[in-house]
Amino acid sequence: MTEKTSEKLPISDFYKVVDYVTIFRSEKWWEAIVVFESFGKRSIGLYLWQNRNGAWKRKHKFNIRNLDEWNKLKTAIEQLLPKLVSR
């Protein structure tokens, strides 16, 4: 899961990438969690890119801006996780 590639992440040069972890990558899809900085503030972004005609295009982006926001997300996800198990 902690895959790094020599290829530069397909993120705008506007953002400074601090670190990232690739979750999944195939010829068509690339999913990664990215710590990035803009205007002196850091955020964590959950990215999904699609390879179209040889170029990576962002399909989805979701940001986590602070610890309070993360805790709310984590609580909601933990509450819903049991529903992933089919009966």
Image (tube, rainbow, N blue to C red):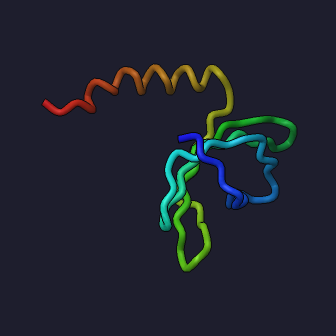
Q: Is residue 63 above or below residue 68?
A: below
- Identify which residue is drawn at 77% across, 46% down: 17
6, 47: nearer the viewer = 6
- Identify which residue is drawn at 67% across, 32% down: 65
29, 43: nearer the viewer = 29
- Residue 38 image position (x, y, % from top left): 81, 44
- Identify which residue is drawn at 17% across, 33% down: 86
7, 62: nearer the viewer = 7
- Residue 81 image position (x, y, % from top left): 33, 26
- Identify which residue is drawn at 71% across, 36% down: 43
Q: Residue furthest left?
A: 87
Q: Is residue 87 left or right of residue 84?
A: left
Q: Is residue 72 left or right of residue 63?
A: left
Task: Count the labels in the image.
Answer: 0
24, 71: nearer the viewer = 24
Q: Is residue 69 above or below residue 55?
A: above
Dividing the picture into quadrants, the one containing residue 67 is top right
Dividing the picture into quadrants, the one containing residue 12 is bottom right
Q: Residue furthest right?
A: 40
- Residue 11 image position (x, y, % from top left): 71, 57
- Residue 61 image position (x, y, % from top left): 58, 50
For the C terminus, which image quadrant?
A: top left
Q: Is residue 81 left or right of residue 11?
A: left
